[in-house]
Image (cartoon, rainbow, N blue to C red):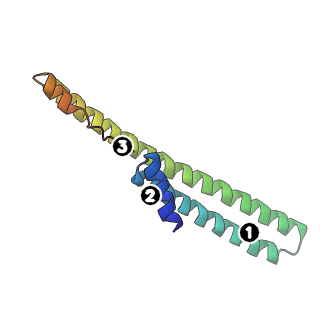
């Protein structure tokens, strides 16, 4: 139900459903990783017998969160590059089309058609 609501919001706002799927996928990975880090930290803390062991658990949790952030950064970066490559490809196609155009109508047909939103 929540996913349908979120998809509906994206449609109303004119956002791409593929973008939503990417965001949901990345956030899902993030949540799963955070849950795993916290579960491991909790297990460690419950087994800690000394202050030093407890501090080691806290350090391990901090390192886990940092690793998660680094992994997510790489995933997000790759996703941004993929989107930029797609945009570049569309621009290059439009550029080739315009370069090969013989008249104003040909140039007009090179541009993407805008879909009018109904009210």
Image disc number at residue 21: 2
Determine whether the residue tagged by mark 1 lies in a helix, strand or loop: helix
Residue located farthest toward the top when viewing the structure as drawn? 103
Q: Which of marks 3 and 2 is in front?
A: 3
Marked residue nearer the N-terminal end (3 or 1): 1
Residue in the image at 54% along x and 63% along y: 28
- Crowding around mark 1 (Cα neighbors within 10 Å: few <14, some 14 to 19, many 20+) is many
Q: How crowded is mark 3: few (under 14 residues within 10 Å), some or many (20 or more)?
A: few
User: Residue at point 30% right, 38% down?
Assistant: 114
Which residue sits furthest left?
102
Residue denoted by label 1? 41
* Cα distance in 3D space between marks 1 and 2: 30 Å
Query: Where in the figure is residue 12, as x and y percent of width and height?
Result: 45, 50
> Where is residue 47 drawn, in percent x and y?
81, 77
Q: Quadrant of residue 51?
A: bottom right
How far apart, in angstroms, are the residues tagged by discs 3 and 2?
23 Å
Image disc number at residue 15: none
Mark nearest the camera among 3 and 1 is 3
Residue drawn at the location 69% of the way across and 72% of the way down: 39
98 horizontally vs 29: left or right? left
Q: Nearer the viewer, residue 51 or 100?
A: 100
Q: In the rendered picture of this protein, how many numbered marks are placed on residues?
A: 3
SS category of the residue bearing label 2: helix
Say above or below: 60 vs 87: below
């Amino acid at each position: 139900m929540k996913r349908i609501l979120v998809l509906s919001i994206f449609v109303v706002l004119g956002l791409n459903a593929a973008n939503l799927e990417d965001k949901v996928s990345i956030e899902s990975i993030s949540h799963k990783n955070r849950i795993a880090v916290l579960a491991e930290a909790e297990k460690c803390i419950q087994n800690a017998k000394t202050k030093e062991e407890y501090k080691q658990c806290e350090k391990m949790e901090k390192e886990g969160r940092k690793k998660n952030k680094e992994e997510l950064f790489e995933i997000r970066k790759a996703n941004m590059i993929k989107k930029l490559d797609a945009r570049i490809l569309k621009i290059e196609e439009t550029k080739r089309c315009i370069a090969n155009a013989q008249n104003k109508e040909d140039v007009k047909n090179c541009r993407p058609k805008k879909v009018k939103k109904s009210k």
